[in-house]
Image (tube, coloured by chain):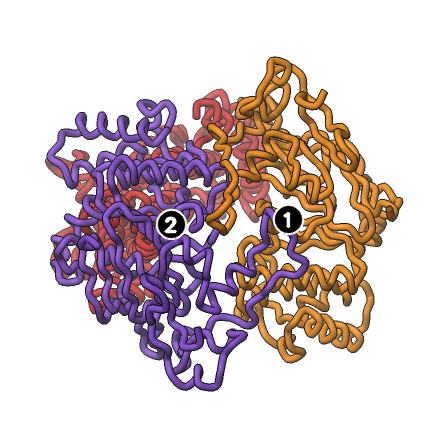
Amino acid sequence: MAEPLLAIKNLKTYFISKDAEVRAVDGIDIEVQPRQVVCIVGESGCGKSMTSLSIMRLVPKPKGKIVDGEIWFNGRDLLKLSEDEMTDVRGNEISMIFQEPMTALNPVLTIGEQITEVLLRHRKMTKRQALAKAIEMLQFVGVPRASEIVHEYPHQLSGGMRQRVMIAMAMVCEPKLLIADEPTTALDVTIQAQVLELMKKMREDFNTSIILITHDLGVVADMADHVVVMYAGQVVESTDADSLFAEPTHPYTKGLLASIPSLEEEKDVLYSIPGTVPDAAAFPKGCRFADRCPIAQPSCREKMPELREVKPGHLVRCDLV
Amino acid sequence: MGTYVVRRVLGMIPMMFLITVFVFLIMHAAPGNAFDAIMNPAIKDIEQLKQQLEHNAGLDKPLWWQYVHWLGLFVTGNWGFSFNHHVPVTQLIGPAIRNTLILGILAEVLTIAVGVPFGIVQARNPYGKFDYTSNVVLFCLYSVPFFVFAIFMIYFFAIDLQWFPAQGSTGTGPGAGSIGDHLYHALLPALSLALVNSTVYSRYTRGSMLDVSRKDYVRTARAKGLDEGRVFTKHVFRNGMIPIVTQFGLDFGSLVGGLIITEGIFQYQGMGQLVIDAVNGRDYNVIMATTVLIAFGVLIGNLLADILYAVVDPRIRYD
Amino acid sequence: MSENLLEVRNLKKYFPITAGLLRRTVGHVKAVDDVSFTVRTGETLGIVGESGCGKSTTGRMIMRVLEPTSGEIVFDGQDITKLRGKELRAVRPKFQMVFQDPYASLNPKMGIEEIIAEPLIVNGVNRKQATERVIHLLERVGLRADDRNRYPHEFSGGQRQRIGIARALALNPKLIVADEAVSALDVSIQSQILNLMMDLKKEFNLSYIFISHNLAVVRHISDRVGVMYLGHMVELADKRSLYADPRHPYTEALLSAAPEPKRQGRRERIILQGDVPSPANPPKGCPFHTRCPKVMDICKVERPALKQVAPNHLVACHLYN
């Protein structure tokens, strides 16, 4: 395979306070190939959002800290860059969109100001050129009346339109990597479908790789080339999308898939994974899923299973499969 | 926006009416009247003279008649004579308003010019050394009543160092009454008011800026590659000022209270002094005129703050 | 078929829009515009739709926390639309509500026992009996008796939703309106709550109105499903019939837009253009005609009535005339 665009190696992001050390991301490895859509899927608190903020080096300070690991992007380790060098990367080579388009846009600045700001930062352009480019980009992402919208404020737009604006803003410098953190969770299903289509179009037209963070396996099935399943700060399964849905292997992945009610088939009783996620400040020493796992053995609680290849390209963190 | 302002101004009319009724009743419920205060007890037939004077002033008529009579004259611009100063009320009030406006505006400008930047510096590095130590200092300042400051200031800056006048609103001699002279006299009282108020504003500012800096759109701004300076000026500051503007509007009433006391301490010839003198001397016409104007000022101030609020926050629309 | 527990007839909720100096009413937001349906005893009626379609407003009117503009709500043979004061309080225990955000709907300063016992005490149950009932309910919803001495912030989202359900059950209601009750929960927790709700329904002989934007969840829990769009009920049918053979173009689009967690045999997706029109200015004729892929001339003029096109399958669409 070609050189990956992004390679995360043994990333650890902790939240350190006086009385606790919360291991939000605890030693993960993820690779993203050029033009690939990688979905990171997991439930709240699994560390998926912190992973994305770690790539951007925007982990909330002062408590959050990247304590170990490497993030190789385009031949450079992002964690070794100075803050100034990193600001040249953000919004330019890697950009990000967030869950709540309502709160992710500044309420007191016009749409135009917020988009041109990116261009003025990363491109040598006059304000007028930047505004023209912003309008062009808005038209490209399907915002109607783009030349008027640039003078309007976020609250004047619907949720779906705001997310299109966010996408326009993120893509305006044609980044190599787009990180989308739950971009459609706050949207209605028909609007979600529009936004997902738009993201596919972005990948086609700009050759952008996408890291899509989501809790929705339906979105994963729709979008992903490769899927990384996270649980309690770790990668528990990593494989191409087809084999994930055809042969889910980790008991957690299986449990998740069985828990989702289906649109197409009748299920009398839904499977439900018993219990809750372990506390990130006090992880057990063995497998972190053992307490909720239907096939757990005493040995699972003794030793942390390694992420191992069960089939070519299919990694699972479980010793029993 | 236009209809909103009209509606608000129209809404002030019943409010002003109720305020005048209320002040009128309180005023007449207080014992004594202007003539009790000024008459020499040695005069012969004092009771008869007093009745004569009260009759001339209409004070023997029923209260409702007096009120309607006053209101009728007041709205037509006839604000009556001062019992004590023997000049038309309007003549007394003109310079007093000017002086109070100078003092009030100067005090507010100083409050904001000190408090807001201070809060911003604290918020830029929260929970750091500067934040902690300055918080302790501010808290101490805040705990001291402002009139105590006023007295200390008079002692140090006026009496000891002789940098500023200890009292009055204008000087004598050449240059008296110029803008510079007015500001020179207003500076010390304004400073004593501003010092304590600015501690409050620095707290608001710090809290508001910190609150905003945790917002999603600030994270978005960083994700765009903006440097910290631009993130602050463009994204944090403007949003952080919105609650400060609101607070500014709410503070108008308490600013008036502070002005009255400060003017008393500095013997500053403003509305505050005028009100206090008038109340002490039961100078009915002056009391009514000054309270109406002060109430009007507070209401207009609140309206201005609401309009300003809509200016800084495009989400606020009045219609 | 068993008798009707709830009959809703021609229910409307118009919120006035005011403007000008005298705040004259210049229009209405037609949040719910002429909706009729029934809920049979022991049945779960699902109501799906996107944000702003009026599904929550409908739920709140049935709960009598929001005054209908017009229409009738007949509960258990009694017209409750006009009840006030004492009479309303007498019937209130019979219908209860479960909310989306269990944290916002539980008073943080009240202990769990107080929260659950409050409706009992208000209705004249003595302390000792109330405590016994609280313990019984907590154990029934999967919490421990000791939990009654704790406070809402000590619980996870799923546990809080269990508390919310226990509170709703305290007075032995006949009908529970669940408004997005599992929408804020992670998949594995969502299935736990859905299973619990289905068990409780059998055990306590409940009827549900289950309001949600999630079509798969609604399919799983409901017997019949109503689809709302812009304040109107556009389709109302038995679950099997609705999901296997959706008649209304909106329902079709909605179903096709919801991503299923599978890779093979995915349905063709219908992507609707544009946003939902504002309920303050709804289109003339069929509310859906502005986005409908099968729009005809008549749709722009005349509003279609909800009528039967197959057994237990009602549709409001001119295609079926």
Per the image, label 2 sits on a secondary structure element best described as loop
The residue that label 1 is drawn on is: C218
Horizontal and vertical percent position of residue B164: 16, 51
Q: Is B299 or C314 nearer to us in this picture?
A: C314
**Label 1 sits on what residue type?**
Val
Q: Colour of chain C?
A: orange
The residue that label 2 is drawn on is: A224
Which numbered disc, 1 or 2, marks the residue closer to the eye? 2
> Given the image, what chain letter belongs to the residue carrying mark 1?
C
Horizontal and vertical percent position of residue B175: 12, 35
**Label 2 sits on what residue type?**
Ala
Q: Residues within 10 Å of mark 1 (few under 14, many from 20)?
A: many
Q: Colour of chain B?
A: red
Tell me the quarter of the picture where residue B249 sits.
top left
Tell me the quarter of the picture where residue C27 sits.
top right
Q: Is residue B22 left or right of residue B189?
A: right
Q: Is B83 or C86 nearer to us in this picture?
A: C86
In the image, residue B78 above or below residue C172: above
Q: Which chain does the purple colour mark?
A: A
Horizontal and vertical percent position of residue C118: 72, 65
Per the image, label 1 sits on a secondary structure element best described as helix
In the image, residue A143 above or below residue C111: above
Q: Is A184 or C150 nearer to us in this picture?
A: A184
Q: Residue at x 69, y 22 (%)?
A: C304
Distance from label 1 to label 2 (Cα)?
Answer: 26 Å
Q: Which mark is residue A189?
A: none
